[in-house]
Amino acid sequence: MPACLTGRGNWSNPPKPFYPGPIMDIFADFAARVAAALKTLYPEASAELIGRAVVEPPRDPAHGDLSSNAAMVVAKPLGKNPREIAAALAEHFKSDPDVETVEVAGPGFLNFRLGEPVWHRVLKSIDLLGEAYGKVDLGKGEKVNVEYVSANPTGPMHVGHTRGAVFGDALASLLVYSGYDVTREYYINDAGGQVEVLAQSAFLRYREALGETIEIPPGLYPGDYLKPVGEQLADAYGRELLDLPEAEWLPKVKDMTLKMMVELIKTDLAELGVAHDVFFSERTLHGQGGDIDTTLEWLREKGLVYQGRLDRPKGQTDDDWEDREQTLFRATQYGDDVDRPLVKSDGSYTYFAADIAYHRNKYLRGFSHMINVLGADHSGYVSRLKAAVKAVSGGEAEMDVKIMQLVRLMRDGQPFTMSKRSGDFIRLSDLVKEVGVDATRFMLLYRRNEQSMDFDFALVKEQTRDNPVFYVQYAHARTCSVFRTAESELPALDLSPAELSKAPLELLVSPADIELIKAVAQWPRTVTAAALAHEPHRIAFYLYELAAAFHSFWAKGREDRGLRFVNPEDLKLTVARLALVGAVRQVLVNGLTVLGVSAPDELS
RNA sequence: GGCCCCGUAGCUCAGCGGAUAGAGCAGCAGCCUUCUAAGCUGUUGGUCCCAGGUUCGAUUCCUGGCGGGGUCACCA
């Protein structure tokens, strides 16, 4: 029995080679078999070298079901001819009962064609595993912190926050699905000057609630959403605050306003299906002896804080620029371009100083894996954030920053802009009301995060093939429709999961059947790739492809009655086909669930 | 000027260091006495921005250009 190697080079705990049990991922499985074969044939090859070999479906299906570059990867370091190695591997795999044919192609590709029984076993695995099919356990329970949204608590969520919110939420789900212990976190910027402004704005609304006619001066927040805050303040304090000096009413107003703003944000996010586990307040880091103090002290001891001057930024006409000595963090020591200020000219800490303390706090809470989801306007912040994480963790923690490129809102083909200052921004809740959660989420995830995108209201609301979310949901609804039809036409059939898991899958021999099984077999592989790359859009694209494969099969039944799912003339085949449809349905549900998109049983 | 992202079919975009680069839309030609046509089938369409480099192999990685977008002490 050959030793077995997982992609991560674990030699000690081999899964059984030709198992009787469910197959989670046929590609990972064959990667392990190829690695084992290499190890047997070439004991001198290092695990690291072997780990570079991959098994994947070839782009051109004419090349077979699975393809490996193992021979080419290994050839040069071993000083051997790649085709020779490939030939040796091919010879080795002739005895593998799952392999129908194996051939050497091109410069040394190893192309496998698998027998039908393997695909039937994959299908059976899906029906046995159900929602667990695709849970690949990459994470092995490791803790990951995903921070996203973290919008200023000065008002409701607006459309500009939506992409990051959806992305962060889907990425977190994907990582949970892949076996990580995920904490979804929101950092509340409740310590800066804008919070003072917010409190002053709320105070005006408070006076308004007490009967005064007020006008919101420029520079304050004009939005109506502060009216309820004013009323709440009036309820709680009556006229009491009016007689107090600002220094005394401000903290009270600030506290209540912030509390209500965070609630407002939670409510808005909930409408998008987004929920965080932790809301972390920046304010808790400030204060005498707080986390910022201790963190900076800690950095100072390491020689990472000093007094110095910065160059005036080039290219920018900066009238306000003042050359002064500053307290700086040695970000350049960790790959940043310049050292970064920690203290403002008024003596208070910069946002960045608090953020260093915040990320040290994350590290001390046990997070060695951190992901931050930020908007494109923060791209200049990435290198200093990574520098901070390296510094506070002594290089132990890794930070991945996902930048969301801009979303341009379009209506009737015309872009429109908004300004937060005038209060005419489009609220997230309005967006959700207009186009719906599913369409919003899917469309925003149907693009790489580095790619800027247009979000056209008309298009997103359209219920046609132009709109991928309906295409995928329709495929799911169709799978349900097949079961409904089967139940009404063939009431004698037992279609319970238990019965379906015993279905005579060996009857599924048509090319169409096998093609569809191959499509669902890609699911765990897709999850693995998406989770490793932190790219949820891969899930969305996969679901679209699976939906296409299913719709295509469906249409074949129109011309060839033998390819119908429900076939009263052949009950055994019908049961087998329903097991296949059930597997498609299951994978669609699993994928849509990861993306936070619903899988309706029928479209109305 | 520095840094970040993008540049792939007419348009919007996928593409994991692999073989003859894909999908949707648009265009053209077809498929409804139906397991929901909200769907399917066929077809036209490419200098993967340019030039070097690394590699057995580059659309993919690196360097330098060109074009588009974002951003640039102390705001958050």
Image (spheres, coloured by chain):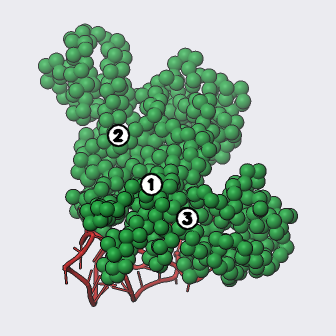
Chain colours: A green, B red
Residue A558 makes an appearance in the image: yes
Q: Residue at x 35, y 25 (%)?
A: A259
> Amino acid type of disc 3?
Arg
The residue furthest front is A492
Counting other residues with Cα less than 10 Å from the Cα at mark 2, is it few (<14), some (14-19), or many (20 or more)? Answer: many
Q: Residue at x 52, y 24 (%)?
A: A285
- Which residue in the protein does label 2 denote? A269
- Which residue in the protein does label 1 denote? A498
Looking at marks 2 and 1 on the same chain, the residue that comes earlier in the sequence is marked by: 2
Mark nearest the camera among 1 and 3 is 1
Cβ–Cβ below 8 Å for labels 1 and 3? no
Q: Secondary structure at mark 1?
A: helix
> Amino acid type of disc 2?
Leu
Mark nearest the camera among 3 and 2 is 3
Q: Is residue A36 left or right of residue A232?
A: right
| Residue situated in front as seen by the camera: A90 or A462 | A90
- Which residue in the protein does label 3 denote? A121
Residue B68 pos. (x, y %): 42, 64
What's the chain of the residue with tag 1? A
Cβ–Cβ below 8 Å for labels 2 and 1? no
A413 to A225, vertically: above or below:
below
